[in-house]
Amino acid sequence: MAKDLTDVINGRMRKRETRLVLGKAFRHRPIYFTGVIKPIWDDELGKHGDYRFEVVHPRNIDVDHTATENDARKMSWIAHHYELTIKEVLMRWPDKEEELYAELKIEADKEPSEQKLASKIKISEIWFEWYEKEDDKWSKLYGVAWRYKDVVFDKIKNPYYDWEG
C-alpha cells in the first residue's frame, strides 16, 4: 500500500504543472526568503474534482507575527491579499452589496456604472484557528474569512476539512 501511495505522490510531483508551480515559488526564495504555494480545490479537475496549486507572491501574504516557528501549521492565522473587481465581489457575496457600497462611498440608490464595477479592490482571505466551547469542553476549529476594510463578506469553517468525520 505504501508503494502504491508513493507512486501516486511521485506521479503528481512529476506533472508539468506542478513542476512549473514549484519552479516559480522557488524563484521567490532568494529575494523574499520564502516561497508560497496555495492549494485550491477545483471542482472542474478530474471526475470528482481535485487540488490544483498556485504560486502566491510573498508580498501578498501576512503571517501571524506572534508565531515562534516558521511552520504555517503552528501559526494562529495567515492572510492572503488579492484583487477582485467590485462586480466579482458582488457576484460572490450578493448579500453584502449595501455594506460594500457604503464602504466604497457608492450611492446605494443609484445603479453603479460597469466602469465603476470593473474597479479592483484588494480583499483579504484570512485562514485562522479559533476555539469554541461545547458542553464545558473547548475544541479547536479552523476557518476562513473574507473581508475588505471593515466589511466581512463571509466566515466559515475550513471548507477542505471533513467536519462530519
Image: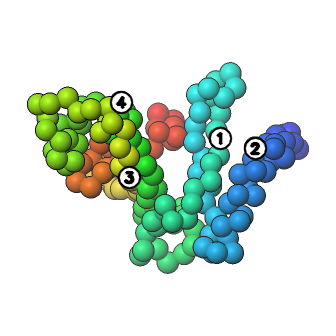
**Marks 2 and 4, how far apart at CA:** 29 Å
Quadrant in which residue 92 is drawn:
top left
Q: Residue at x 59, y 33 (%)?
A: 42
Label 2 crowd (10 A; few <14 / some 14-19 / many >=20): some
The mark lying in front, picked from 3 and 1, is: 3
Lateral position of residue 106 relative to residue 153, left or right: left
Q: Name the residue under label 4.
A: 91
Q: In the image, is residue 94 above or below residue 70? A: above
Quadrant in which residue 101 is drawn:
top left
Q: What residue type is labelled 4?
A: Met
**Marks 4 and 3, how far apart at CA:** 16 Å
Task: Give 115 or 65, whichever is nearer the viewer.
Answer: 115
Lateral position of residue 150 relative to residue 28, left or right: left
Q: Residue at x 36, y 56 (%)?
A: 130
Q: Mark 2 points at which residue?
A: 17
Pointers 1 and 2 in contact (C-beta within 8 Å): yes
Q: Residue at x 27, y 47 (%)?
A: 152
Kind of element beneath mark 4? helix
Task: Give 27 or 14, whichever is nearer the viewer.
Answer: 27
The mark lying in front, picked from 1 and 4, is: 4
